[in-house]
Image: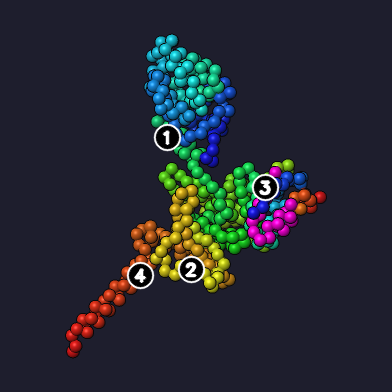
Amino acid sequence: MIQKEVTLLNRLGLHIRPAAQLTKIAEKFKSDVYLLKDGMRVNGKSIMGVMMLAAARGSTLVIECLGDDEQQVMDELVQLFENKFYEE
Amino acid sequence: MSELLQVSVFYQDNQDRLKLKLRNSPRGLTREIGQKEIHRPGLALAGFIELFTFDRVQILGNTEMKYLHSLSAEDLKKSLSRFFEFEIPCLIITNENPVLADLAAAADAVGIAVFTSPLTTTEATHLLSDYLDQKFAPSMAIHASLVDVYGTGLIFTGRSGIGKSEVALDLVERGHRLVSDDIVTLTRTAENVLMGHGREFLKHYMEIRGVGIIDVAAMFGVRAVRQQKRVETEVELVEWRSDMNYDRTGLDENHKEYLGVKIPHVVLPIYPGKNITVIAEAIALNLHLKVYGFHPAREFSRALTEVMDNQSRLQSYLEKDFE
C-alpha cells in the first residue's frame, strides 16, 4: 500500500469534471484507490464518492493505492493533480 | 459524529427545539461536550461531590434552583465556587427559572455558558437525550447503495462498477425507494439498530455509467426516495465464478457486522442476463417471512424429512409382513 499527499491547484477544486477524470484513471487499474480528506475515506473509483469530499482549491488530500499496479495508478493520479487536471 | 461537540454547535442546534437562551458571556461557547449523558447536579450543589459527573451537560430544574435560593449569601457563594471548580461543559436552567445573578457571574468567571429553557425539566431531558444520542451515535461510511425494498432495508455492496447503482435504479423503477446511492453513512442507534442515510448534498443523485449523473428524486418523485432506513440485509454482488461455492439451500445464514450490529449477508453472483432486481425482491420478501417466524428453507427441509420418514416407515412395515 502506498500513500501520497497532494494539493488541489486547479481553479474550481474537485468539481464534477476533475472528479470524472480522476475516477476514469482509477478505474483503468486493478488496484484499489482511496482518497482521504478530513477523516473521510472514499473510493477513488466512484465519482459520487470523490465529489462528496467537496474538496476546494488549496485543500490537501491523501491518495492511497493498494494492489499490484499501485505505483502506476499513483503516478498517473499525481500527474493529474500536478497538471491541474489539464484545465484552461 | 462520535467526537467532541462544541457548545456553540450544541446551542445552535437546540435554540429552536429547547428555546435555549444564552444568559451570560459567549466565552463559554468554545467549551466541548464529550458525553451523551446529562446530569442534574442537586447533590453536587449541596456539597456531595464524590462521583459528580461534571463532564456532562448539567440541568438545573426547580429543585436545584429552589435549593440555591434557600441558601444564605455565604452558603450560596461556597456552593457555587465548589461547583464551578469542575470543568463543566455548560448548564441549562429549565422551567423558566430566573437566573441567579451570582450563578451567572460565577459561571462567567470560569467561562461556562449558562442557558435557560422555558421547557419543563422532563421535556428538556427527553429532547436533549434524543439529540445527544444522535450526535454521539457511532457511525461509519461505506461504499454501497441502500434501497428500501418492500419495507426491508437492503444494502448492495461489491466492487466499483459491478452494478450497484443499476440495481438500485431498477428497484426504484419497480416502485421501491432509494435512500442513498454509492455512499451510505451507517449509525448505530441507542436501541442497537443500524440506520443508514445519505450525505446531505449528494442525496438521491446517482451515477449511471454511460449516462452520467441523474437525480432520482426529480425523475421519479417523492415516493421513490426516503431519507433514512434501517439496514436489514447486505447483498454483496460478485462476479460469477465457476470455482466458487454459493449458498444453495438458505439453511445456514451468514452475517456481517457493522458497528457491532450483526446483519444477514447474502453473496449474489451475477452474470449477464441474470435479473438481480427480482432476486433482491425475493431476498426482501424472504426476510419478511423469517421475521414473521416462517423460515422457507427449514420448512421445506422439515417437509422433505417427513416424507422420507413416512416412506421408510411404510417400507419397514411392509418388510415385516409379507403378503
In the picture of the structure, the residue carrying the numbered disc 2 is: B246
> Which quarter shows the C terminus of chain B?
bottom left
* Subunit under mark 1: B
Q: Where is residue A18? Give x, y as percent.
A: 72, 52
Mark 2 → mark 3, Cα distance in angstroms? 37 Å
Kindly indicate whether the residue at mark 3 contacts the one at mark 2 (C-beta within 8 angstroms).
no
In the picture of the structure, the residue carrying the numbered disc 1 is: B126
Share a chain, discs 4 and 3? no
Kindly give the residue lying farthest to the right in the view shown: A88
Where B73 falls versus B2 (above or below)? above
* Residue B149 visible (yes or no): no
Q: Quadrant of residue B46?
A: top left
Q: Where is residue A28? Give x, y as percent.
A: 69, 62
Mark number, residue B87: none
User: What element does badge 1 sit on?
Assistant: helix
Share a chain, discs 1 and 4? yes
Q: Nearer the viewer, mark 1 or mark 4?
A: 4
Write the residue at 65% across / 50% down: A35
Q: Could you tell me the amino acid type at mark 1?
A: His
* Residue B295 visible (yes or no): yes
Report the span colored magenta.
Answer: A60-78
